[in-house]
Image (cartoon, rainbow, N blue to C red):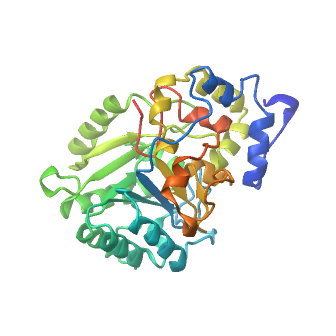
Amino acid sequence: MPNNEQRISPQSSPEEQVIFLEKNTCGIPPFNSKLAETGEYPLYPTNIDILQINTGYICNLRCRHCHVDAGPERREVMTRETMEFCIDALRNSSIKTIDITGGAPEMNPEFRWFIANLRATKPDAEILVRSNLTLLTGENKYSDIPEFLKDQRVTIIASLPCTTKATVDSIRGTGVFERSIAALQLLNNIGYGKAEENLNLNLVYNPGGAFLPEAQQHLEQAYRKHLLETYGIVFSHLYTITNMPVSRFLNDLVAHDQYCDYMALLSGNFNHNAVNNLMCRNTISVGWNGTLHDCDFNQMLHLPVTSDAPQHIREFNAETLRKRRITLGQHCFGCTAGAGSSCQGCLL
């Protein structure tokens, strides 16, 4: 139970979640003080290599562990005007990786326009699109997207939190596993996941509960073997991502009286070697409304970049952003536990 028996509800705002995390320390020292022991506090960027852009929180699924709190009822969607600000920022920058996320980014009505214009602006960039897979099969208005992404040479990062139907459906909804498998087979059929085609298909594993992921390399081998032998599916890489004590997963932890135990697990497995590779050190996260954040998790907690740095993508200035001080909190223990965690998988 959190100290002072503080509670949080599914309706709690991001600001209320930040207060909850700050007040309910469970006897764990602040992340800042833990970082100071490594000599890395305050924390600053090393560079800006990745622009991560959240195109909106609308999604056709409502996954139990979702830190975005995405779902069909969300209405926050990036406009074309904000997308144009993103393109302007990229046009004059050295950024080589563009990471498109959501929600389900495919559901943004400007999705195809945005991807095509990103490719035209940055012909040699790696463009990543994070997909829940389930929109890519069947006869619907999204059925052209697999071929479209292939034509635009987009890397697909697909969520598949387990290789068993029961676990996936319990986390993501009934029928999601079968639809995900069908989508992966479709993507394989057009060349994704096959080395000779140079079309990367990367999978993402999230733990199904309040525990750390297995070693990424070991789990990748297990995924590779099972998916190939059972479904004939191949893929490029597997990313393991630690569940962050943010949004829906935070609510789940508190509701099941696991919050303090989980925070103790994260802090007890703090790995100072992961600090050098934290994604906040080489990434800028753009919210659906254009606000700038140090990482995707800070975005979900409404924690902007420091006030001396540009606050909106229309004000993007790489040099100024490189000098900013990174905003930290107790949730950051999630990125430094074990082998470390980022949107690109483990850090070590």
**Quadrant in which the C terminus appears:** top left
Expressed as whole percent of the image width and height from the top left, the position of residue 238 reads: 33, 42
In this orientation, does residue 64 appear? no
Q: Quadrant of the N terminus?
A: top right
Judge whether residue 136 can be spotted in this image.
Answer: yes
Name the side, left or right, on which 327 lies relative to 48.
Answer: right
Front residue of 204 and 18: 18
Rendering coords of residue 343 (x, y %): 45, 46
Residue lying at 65% horizontally and 45% vertically, measured from the top left: 246
* 156 to the left or right of 18: left
Q: Is residue 309 left or right of residue 18?
A: left
Does 330 sit above or below residue 72? Answer: above
| As drawn, 303 above or below 46 | below
Measured as percent of width and height from the top left, residue 155 is found at 30, 58
Frontmost residue, 179 versus 292: 292
Which image quadrant for residue 175?
bottom left
13 displayed left or right of 223: right
Q: Residue at x 32, y 61 (%)?
A: 183
